[in-house]
Image (cartoon, helix red, strand yellow):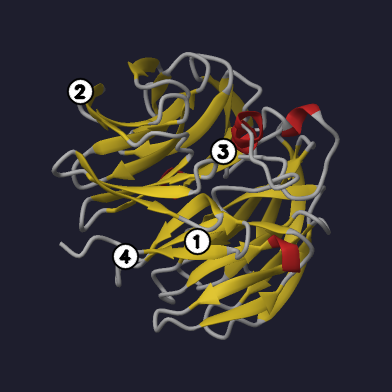
Amino acid sequence: MKQSRWQSGVLTTVAMLTSCTIWAQAIAPSSGLISRSGIAYSSKSGKVYVVDSEHSAIVVLSAGGTAKTVKTGSEPVSIAVDERTGKVYVANSGDKSVTVLDGVTDDIVATVPTAARPYAIAVDERSGKVYVSNTFSNMLTIINGKTNTATNLKTGSADAILVDAPHRKVYLLSYEGDSLTLLDESTNMTVRIPAGAMHLWGIAELGKTLYVTHVQDATVAAIGTEKQGVQEIPTGLMPCALAVDVEHGAVYVANYGDGAISAVNARSGKTMWTVSVGGHPQAISIDETKRLLYVADAQGQSVSIIDAGQRRLRNKLQLQGYPYALAVDTKTHRVFAATMGPAPYEEILAPRN
């Protein structure tokens, strides 16, 4: 999650851990945050969107392979797409705003002010609401997708947002806490849900269960969304990012501390297998059709490709930049990484067979 950007050309272990705010929470606000939502794919438009913070822009990659730059606000950090309307929302950390784009024309249709410096962003496609957390702030900005107007709600600090649209619930995760904040969309009331430990990093949902990583104790919490209770699932050291495979009922965990990927069976709540990729993986995405996992290691400047069906490492690719977020085009199976370094993104070449 929050991270002080690459300094003096060197990425240290401490700096990379600030994906989950270890460093960023301890210092005054500074430019150059990064987010695992720094890149997004839209199945509606077939486009991939990636932030280019250095140039206050996003890059739009079409399904046909062309790329164009669209100017946004200052220091864009994260992106969310409403697949129903096709609108694209870009959180601009530098000027406290969200840029709204038409997904067909890529034209800017609105700029919406936020309560402070926006960071995490997520869309409820049923209601059309857009939820935006603000760095070093306890305010959540809620944008009405129909009118492009915003209200602010005091919910506490949030480093990640997960929307459960069918049940009209929004889950807010804070690294510094030991619980999630559940926001009821109908009433705007909030309640705390115990998450089993301090220092929460990644969050994902599969079926009626939330999965939340515990950085400090090498486990993932499985939290029931109906009958709330915490089951702790042992994984690798310092679990961070998560990816879910709906068809096969699996949750994949990137373990930053020991360079391994753990596969958890969602039914049994047990780890099925582990594959080592080395380094410090901190972002993970899946091509469910091909059952290929893509794992980004910003510190090691690499992306590993795992065949989840065969439970083995297929390839490890070295990049020019430092990959910190991933997006998979589910139609063409092209894969892109948002990177720090020479360019804002790089394409990852998938295995042919």
For marks 1 and 3, the one nearer the N-term is 1
Q: Which one is in front in this view, the residue at disc 2 or the one at disc 1?
A: 1
Q: How many marks?
A: 4
Which residue matches tag 1? Answer: 40
In space, the residues marked 2 and 1 are separated at their CA atoms by 31 Å
Disc 3 packing (10 Å; few <14; some 14–19; many ≥20): some
In which quarter of the view is residue 199 placed?
A: top right
Q: Which one is in front in this view, the residue at disc 4 or the one at disc 2?
A: 4
In space, the residues marked 4 and 1 are separated at their CA atoms by 12 Å
Which labelled disc corresponds to residue 184? 3
Q: Nearer the viewer, residue 251 or 104?
A: 251
Disc 1 packing (10 Å; few <14; some 14–19; many ≥20): many
**Whether residue 154 is visible:** yes
In space, the residues marked 3 and 2 are separated at their CA atoms by 29 Å
Q: Residue 94, image x and y in percent?
A: 81, 56
Which labelled disc corresponds to residue 330? 4
Which residue matches tag 2? Answer: 268
For marks 3 and 2, the one nearer the N-term is 3
- Amino acid residing under circle 1: Ala
